Image (cartoon, rainbow, N blue to C red):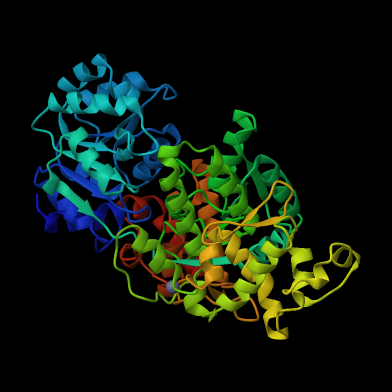
């Protein structure tokens, strides 16, 4: 079995004519019987790296996966490509039959949860069936360094050690250097078996804006973005409120958070996965274990927990490789609350937690490329500008506002570090209302000290200083000095401010020509047929064909089954099952 053989199977089974990224390296190692840890971002086509060898090699690939929902998603997609796949879980009713097929070598893939894999009974079952590969999905679950440690993953090493001739393929999307080393060690994979794909997701356009009016800002986003989307909100209450207000746009909108009944959550998730334009408003509880490739946007209505969290959550957009957007709306209060919580953190964790917040502050405040900051955070060396984030597309003006910052901090200090922004602004701009006069703040040296051209900078400056921690909030919502405020006042630290261009970019066309056409009758008819077939089969539309496959059909207008089979994503099984129906629609439109 060699890579040319693999290319043939890649085309026949999956309908692709080339591998993406590091897929060929990983598949090459697996076919050579070498154990491997593949670190690949979501959307890079991880599952193909074990599904393809599983089809080619005699015997079954045992896939260990921690989430039943995810397992069944992958199972459906594999079966749609004609791969012989089954799962052994508590919810699968055909267990006897699956075990029989497994033993007789009639399965390419067998999915199991780590809890089942850890049982003695399962080891016995393995010893009586032909095996070709162990694939360990979400492999970071084996490490206590990762944030999703699953104790049963520790039982996998002894299980696999009992079958030394069977290679191992561990897969994860999120692992820093420390966690990677731990995974290799815990799963018994040699260090040279590590393959790391880049973290870049070039089809995702990042945009980060201050949160002025989140309801309006999100409605504008929905108006610009067709297709399924996720809006993350920080609390259950905000999820509920936003779901109601966004539903007023006429778009299908559902809420998802841990406070909903389990069956409501399951129903909402199911509806979202099956939909082509629904918006899910959710807490971060939503998304783990969902493998929906056609999510077109992910919005954050509040600050994410960390850069890693932001990367993971935005990474749920555009897994099919088509253009997608990630929009974050942040407010200074997000940072104030987060910095207040630092007060409850134990001493040992404090520096790490502070660094986490500072990294987020740097990301939201920067006038430089957002993608470059993200990728540098993951240890990469990206180009200065990506051309597909808000700052690259509409570069903000970056100004040194250190002097204005000194005036502002000085006013906060001289008024006693008890007043909110409104009062401080009045003092700085020389407005003498009753409160200013009563406190004698019109007598301060900072009264009326800012120039006219500094006035519009005050609010964004307060926001930036709060994000940076130079300004903190008192118990009663007043501003107080914090962080490096004294260095700024002494001129020992400078403050630069990214001033966005006047108008928010609106309705900008996506880069490249690979967005879905609007108002193309053939494309719409192909989608309608896909919807019909998907409904009948009880699967989400993307399991039948991805949007990119339909776009290629609409463009190429194939007139025969042979021509249709050359379209990307049309494997032999799908050509056989749906080819005639799609040809008919193409002929009729
Ligand atoms: Zn950029």
Q: What residue do we see at 67% from left, 50% from top?
A: 253
Write down the quadrant of residue 139 in the picture.
top left
Which residue is more in the foreground, 480 or 270?
480
Residue 499 picture location, percent across and down:
59, 77
Write down the quadrant of residue 508 in the picture.
bottom right
Residue 380 picture location, percent across and down:
29, 63
State which image quarter holds ligand 1. Answer: bottom left
Q: How many marks?
A: 0
Q: What residue do we see at 45% from left, 59% from top?
A: 318
Where 31 falls versus 264 (above or below)? below
Q: Residue furthest right?
A: 434
Which residue is more in the foreground, 352 or 522?
352
Which residue is more in the foreground, 567 or 92?
92
The answer to whether residue 51 of the structure is visible from this angle is no
The answer to whether residue 148 of the structure is visible from this angle is yes
Horizontal side of 48 relative to 347 (left or right) equals left
Residue 86 picture location, percent across and down:
33, 32
Q: What residue do we see at 30% from left, 64% from top?
A: 562
Q: Residue furthest top?
A: 121
Q: What residue do we see at 19% from left, 57% from top?
A: 24
Residue 327 picture location, percent across and down:
56, 62
């Amino acid at each position: 079995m060699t890579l040319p053989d693999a290319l043939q199977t890649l085309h026949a089974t999956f309908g692709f004519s080339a591998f993406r990224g590091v897929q060929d390296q990983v598949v090459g190692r697996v076919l050579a019987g070498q154990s491997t840890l593949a670190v690949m971002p979501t959307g890079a086509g991880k599952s193909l790296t074990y599904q393809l060898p599983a089809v080619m090699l005699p015997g079954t690939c045992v896939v260990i996966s921690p989430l039943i929902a995810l397992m069944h998603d992958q199972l459906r997609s594999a079966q749609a490509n004609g791969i012989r796949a089954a799962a052994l879980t508590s919810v699968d009713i055909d267990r006897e039959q699956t075990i029989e097929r497994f033993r007789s070598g009639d399965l390419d893939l067998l999915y199991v949860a780590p809890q089942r894999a850890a049982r003695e009974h399962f080891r016995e079952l393995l010893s009586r069936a032909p095996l070709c590969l162990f694939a360990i999905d979400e492999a970071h679950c084996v490490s206590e360094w990762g944030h999703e440690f699953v104790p049963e993953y520790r039982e996998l090493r002894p299980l696999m050690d009992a079958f030394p001739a069977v290679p191992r393929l561990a897969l994860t999307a999120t692992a820093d250097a420390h966690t990677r080393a731990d995974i290799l060690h815990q799963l018994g994979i040699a260090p040279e078996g590590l393959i790391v794909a880049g973290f870049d997701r070039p089809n995702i356009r990042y945009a980060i804006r201050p949160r002025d009016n989140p309801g309006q800002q999100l409605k504008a986003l929905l108006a610009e973005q067709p297709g399924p989307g996720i809006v993350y909100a920080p609390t259950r209450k905000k999820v509920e409120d936003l779901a109601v207000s966004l539903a007023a746009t006429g778009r299908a909108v559902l809420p998802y958070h841990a406070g909903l009944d389990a069956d409501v959550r399951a129903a909402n998730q199911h509806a979202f996965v099956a939909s082509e334009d629904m918006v899910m408003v959710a807490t971060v509880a939503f998304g783990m274990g969902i493998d929906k490739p056609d999510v077109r946007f992910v919005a954050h209505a509040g600050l994410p927990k960390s850069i890693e969290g932001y990367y993971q959550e935005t990474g749920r957009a555009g897994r099919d490789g088509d253009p997608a957007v990630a929009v974050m709306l942040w407010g200074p209060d997000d940072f104030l609350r987060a910095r207040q919580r630092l007060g409850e953190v134990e001493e040992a964790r404090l520096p790490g937690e502070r660094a986490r917040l500072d990294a987020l502050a740097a990301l939201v405040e920067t006038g430089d490329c957002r993608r470059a900051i993200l990728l540098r955070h993951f240890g990469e060396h990206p180009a200065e500008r990506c051309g597909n984030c808000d700052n690259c597309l509409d570069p903000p003006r970056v100004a040194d506002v250190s002097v204005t910052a000194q005036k502002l901090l000085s006013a906060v200090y001289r008024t006693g570090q008890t007043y909110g922004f409104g009062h401080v602004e009045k003092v700085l701009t020389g407005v003498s209302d009753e409160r200013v006069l009563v406190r004698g703040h019109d007598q301060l040296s900072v009264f009326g000290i800012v120039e006219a051209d500094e006035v519009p900078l005050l609010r964004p400056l307060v926001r930036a200083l709060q994000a940076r921690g130079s300004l903190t909030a008192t118990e009663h919502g007043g501003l107080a000095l914090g962080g490096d405020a004294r260095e700024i006042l002494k001129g020992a630290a400078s403050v630069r401010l990214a001033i966005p261009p006047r108008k928010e970019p609106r309705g900008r066309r996506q880069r490249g020509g690979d967005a879905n056409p609007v108002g193309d009758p053939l494309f719409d008819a192909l989608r309608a047929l896909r919807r019909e077939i998907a409904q009948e089969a009880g699967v989400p539309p993307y399991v039948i064909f991805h949007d990119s496959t339909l776009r290629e059909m609409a463009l190429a207008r194939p007139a025969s089954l042979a021509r249709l089979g050359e379209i990307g994503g049309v494997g032999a099984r799908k050509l056989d099952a749906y080819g005639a129906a799609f040809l008919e629609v193409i002929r009729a439109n």
